[in-house]
Amino acid sequence: MKRNQYGVNLDEGIALASQEEFDLLYLESDSEVENRLVEWIKSSATSVVFGGQIGCGKTTTIERALRISEKRPDIVCHFDRNHINPSPLDTWLIVFAEVARFSATQSFPVMVEHLPGLQEILGVSPVEWEESATQALLEKYSPLALEKHQKFKGLLEPLLQHLPGILKTIIQEIEAILGRSIFIFASGVDKFEPGTAAYISLSEPLTVFASFKTLFEVNAVHLFANDRWTHGLKKEVLTVSSLNWIEDMLSKRLGVYAQTYKDQIPILAAYSGGIPRQALRLLDHFIVQHKHYPNQNDAIIHCVEAVNRDFFSFAKKPKNELLKVVAKQNALETTLVSLPGDLETAMRAVFGNWIILKQPEQESLWQVCVNPVIKSSFDNLSADDPEILLLKKYATQQGMSANGLDIDVRVNDWQETLREVVDHPIALNIIEILDTISSALLSKDREDRIIVAYENHQNAEIVRAYLEAKSNTYEYQVWKHVVIQGGNQQTPLNEVVNFLSDKTTDIYSLDFVGDFNDEQLSELNLRRDTFIDKQLIWWVPKNKLPQYLVQWTQLRQLFQIFILEDDISRSLTAEEVEADLEFMKDLVESENTAEFSYVSNLQKVLSYLKADKQHAA
């Protein structure tokens, strides 16, 4: 971008890249994270997960740290460059093309040994390899580039289940040849929302990279979501900037005209919420609006409305209840981000910058605020914390007064205060968590489409039994389950269509078993519109999921994906289930009750958790 050395430098908040831009526009960070990142680049041999909210300056901070350390990554994978709906195969293509680009001048025979046929696609000389990698990634579009792109994917597709092991072996052998660790940069992971098919497509390559020195650029929600590939890795959070720093940045961008707008700069900074990209977008719109509205206050109002439209008009909105609670308490438990099925609340709010994380207060409790550019569109009803709503519901069911339950859970010994009010200790952890999951999956007012990928079919049966029992505690929910068989002699599409033709069903649960060929998967993909108005839960083996997502180019945009073992193990503990069983057993009067269904299924979940804990040990 052309820069003006003395005048106004406006843009929409793109990351600084060139030396000219850093010399002219860079402002020393007011965060210690940059210094720690520099130290990690210089001395560490393990991975780091570097995260922050959209527009907080992650990419600029990374580039600055690389310049200071005078080290560049050996391999850079831009996962967000070309594809908004990548399949696992698209992701693997990016990875292996970038490894090939690095190997062109290093040790490419290693790749040829593990990927037979690679030379036929990329050539035999280092120069050919570099050019072919660029073409395979479609960085320069041409008929030849498209041909190499398709051939590379054709080479990888039959090996889909073996690619994690192949990649790990190739990198290990290259490191052995070089006699040092390879520095990998996984860029653009922050653009992918957890639970989506696109994010699931990244999981296996990221898991492999985590075994090496890798810098992962992620969104703040990935730091708190506790995904399996992040376990044991160092995590760094880039928090929002101070308003004084934002004011200095805006003044720097205005150059000699900063004095003209000295009264408006603090106002624009306040509306930024401490996010540099939002501040720059506000400044951009303010300069434009000021030409139409000479009154600067009017210009500010219109520029805030414009930024609100830019960022939130078509964004997925979290529930108003969450925004109202945050506006009242200015605090958020980041453990809420990792609750499965909770995309309409904390995860969505943080991922989309509806809520801005400011500073940690204690453990998982963060000081937060509702994004200042969001209009006050909340209704006038007062909102309770989720914990308080749950307890009030319990009090009503038990015939007790709900008065006195408005307790601040951040205060020391709040549990004792609560016990004085309701007379008995309440243990509803497991019920609250599974209520969260089931409300996301089983609300008749919505048209949810869920894929549950499992490692162990028995685990899937246990969870399905619980969710089915849960759904049937509501009169209006009718659940039906069917096994859809794959295989060359099967007609799965006909079975699915016939199953969905039953209009009396609210929730359609389909268990995909056997070996589905590409034709069968493609037939399902082409019937995408059949599934749009249905509540669906599809159960698929985790090891088959990459193959399915490659063929489901349309379907993967409709479904939210849960990795069963991950989501259960990070949400539940055996101790919580045992405590809840003790509580629920007292409510069971006979076998033909919802309470009995709860208890019997909780016992199954408890058995799973104990077995999983023994296996992990």
Image: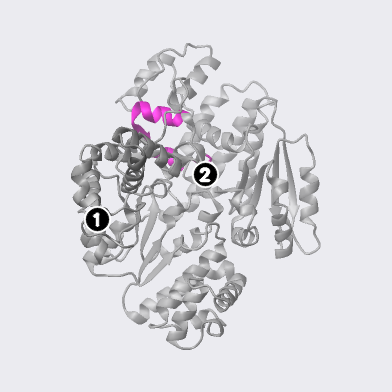
Question: Left or right of 541: which side holds 355?
Answer: left
Q: Quadrant of residue 366?
A: top left
**Where does residue 320 sit, x and y in percent of width and height?**
47, 30
The residue carrying mark 2 is: 568
Q: Residue 329: say if magenta.
A: yes
Q: Which mark is residue 353?
A: none
Question: Left or right of 239: which side holds 147?
Answer: right
Location of residue 210 with respect to 116 vertically, above or below = above
**Where does residue 370 sit, x and y in percent of width and height?**
37, 34
Residue at 40% across / 27% down in the picture?
Answer: 325
The residue carrying mark 1 is: 34
Q: Which element carries disc 1, helix, strand or loop? A: helix
Between 183 and 71, the one nearer to me in the picture:
71
The residue segment tinted magenta is 321-341
Using the numbered discs, state the Cα–Cα distance from disc 2 to disc 1 in whole angstroms. 35 Å
Between 34 and 396, the one nearer to me in the picture:
34
Q: Can residue 158 be seen in this snapshot?
A: yes
SS majority, magenta: helix
Between 561 and 434, the one nearer to me in the picture:
561
Q: Residue 8: say if magenta.
A: no
Q: Which element carries disc 2, helix, strand or loop? A: helix
**Where does residue 205 sit, x and y in percent of width and height?**
48, 64
Amino acid carrying label 2: it is Ile
Of all residues, the one furthest to the bottom in this rendering is 125
Residue at 57% across / 40% down in the picture?
Answer: 605
Residue at 36% across / 34% down in the picture?
Answer: 301
Question: Left or right of 286: which side holds 378?
Answer: right
Q: Can residue 235 be seen in this snapshot?
A: no
Label whose residue precedes the other's in the sequence (2 or 1): 1
Between 1 and 518, the one nearer to me in the picture:
1
**Where does residue 560 sit, x and y in percent of width and height?**
57, 47
